[in-house]
C-alpha cells in the first residue's frame, strides 16, 4: 500500500519562504517515477484547493493562479520524494498542505488522486 | 476557471436511508470528475473517478452518475462511518478544481 508523508510545515512570517517535502513509500508494481503528483491545500474552515501538479518525469509542472510565480514543485525520483518550494508567503497561504498521487501511473499527469497524505500545517502570520 | 458547485451544503440522513449529493460544473468537463470523502484529521479518500467508476476498495453502496454537467454521488444505505465531507473535483484540465463540499450527517 502506497503511503505519503508530508513534512516541513511550520509558522513563518509574511514574505518568508518554506519548503515542503512528501516522501512516498510502499510501491509494489509501478514505481514512484510512473506517477504524477500534486499538492492540494485546505485553509481553515475552507474546502480543498488544488495548488500544483507535476508529471512523472518532472518535465511538466502546473500551478494554480493563486501561487503561480511564487511556488515551485519539483521531484527527486531517486528518493521517491516530491517538494513544494514556497516563496513570498502570504497570510492566505495558511493551510494544511496535502501531497497526493495520481491514481493511474503511465508517466503523464492525470490530476485525480489516490492516495493522499494526512498533510502538514503551514501558518503564515506576523 | 471551471467552477464546481455542490449542493446541499449539509445533508442529514437517517441510517440506512439513501443520500444523494449533487455537483454542477460551470462548463463541460466530459466525465472527468472524481468524488472524495474527507473525515476530520484524515487524508481525503478517492471514492469515484470518471464520474461513475468506483475506486479500488470502495463499498458498493457508493455510486456516481452524470447527466450533462450535473454529477451525482449516491450512498444507497447510509452507515455511521459515512459521516464526512464529500468533495467533487473536475480534472478536465490540469488545473483541477474542487467543489466547496457537502457535509453528510446522521439524522
Image: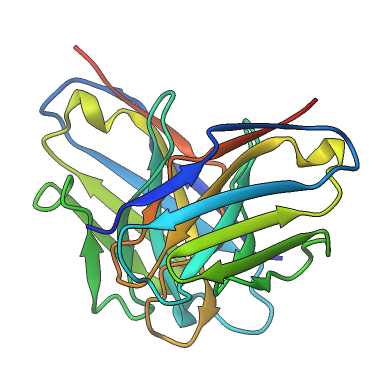
Q: Quadrant of residue A46?
A: top left
In the picture provided, is A12 more to the left or to the right than A115?
left
Where residue A18 sits: x, y (%)?
25, 38
Q: Quadrant of residue B35?
A: bottom right
- Depth check, front residue: A50 or A27: A50
Residue B30 x, y percent position in the rendering: 42, 77
Position of the N terminus of chain B, as image quadrant, is bottom left
Task: Judge whether A48 appears above or below B66 on screen.
Answer: above
In the depicted view, which residue is nearer to us: A119 or B27? B27
Is residue B69 visible to us here? Answer: yes
Residue A39, placed above or below residue A78: above
Residue positioned most to the top: A126
Residue at 45 percent across and 73 percent down: it is: B32
- Looking at the image, residue B88 sits to the left or right of residue A55; the answer is right
Identify which residue, A125 or A79, lies in the foreground: A125
Q: Quadrant of residue B8?
A: top right
The image quadrant where one finds the C terminus of chain B is top right
Q: Is residue A115 visible?
A: no
Q: Position of residue B78 (x, y in %)?
A: 83, 43
Question: Residue at position x 48%, y 82% from top?
Answer: A34
Return the x and y of residue A25 as percentages of the image width and height: 60, 63
Amino acid at each position: 500500500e502506497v503511503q505519503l508523508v508530508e513534512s516541513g510545515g511550520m509558522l513563518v512570517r509574511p514574505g518568508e519562504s518554506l519548503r515542503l517535502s512528501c516522501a512516498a513509500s510502499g510501491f509494489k508494481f509501478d514505481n514512484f517515477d510512473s506517477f504524477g503528483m500534486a499538492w492540494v491545500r485546505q485553509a481553515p474552515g475552507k474546502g480543498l484547493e488544488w495548488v500544483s501538479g507535476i508529471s512523472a518525469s518532472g518535465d511538466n509542472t502546473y500551478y494554480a493562479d493563486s501561487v503561480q510565480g511564487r511556488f515551485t514543485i519539483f521531484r527527486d525520483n531517486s528518493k521517491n520524494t516530491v517538494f513544494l518550494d514556497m516563496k513570498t508567503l502570504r497570510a492566505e497561504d495558511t493551510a494544511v498542505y496535502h501531497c497526493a498521487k495520481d491514481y493511474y501511473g503511465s508517466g503523464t499527469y492525470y490530476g485525480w488522486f489516490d492516495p493522499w497524505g494526512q498533510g502538514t500545517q503551514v501558518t503564515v502570520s506576523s | 476557471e471551471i467552477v464546481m458547485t455542490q449542493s446541499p451544503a449539509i445533508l442529514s440522513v437517517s441510517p440506512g436511508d439513501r443520500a444523494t449529493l449533487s455537483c454542477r460544473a460551470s462548463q463541460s468537463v466530459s466525465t472527468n470528475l472524481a468524488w472524495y470523502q474527507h473525515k476530520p484529521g484524515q487524508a481525503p479518500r478517492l471514492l469515484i473517478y470518471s464520474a461513475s467508476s468506483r475506486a479500488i476498495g470502495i463499498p458498493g453502496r457508493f455510486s456516481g452518475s452524470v447527466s450533462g454537467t450535473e454529477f451525482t454521488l449516491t450512498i444507497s444505505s447510509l452507515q455511521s462511518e459515512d459521516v464526512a465531507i464529500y468533495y467533487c473535483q473536475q480534472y478536465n484540465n490540469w488545473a483541477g478544481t474542487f467543489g466547496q463540499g457537502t457535509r453528510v450527517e446522521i439524522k
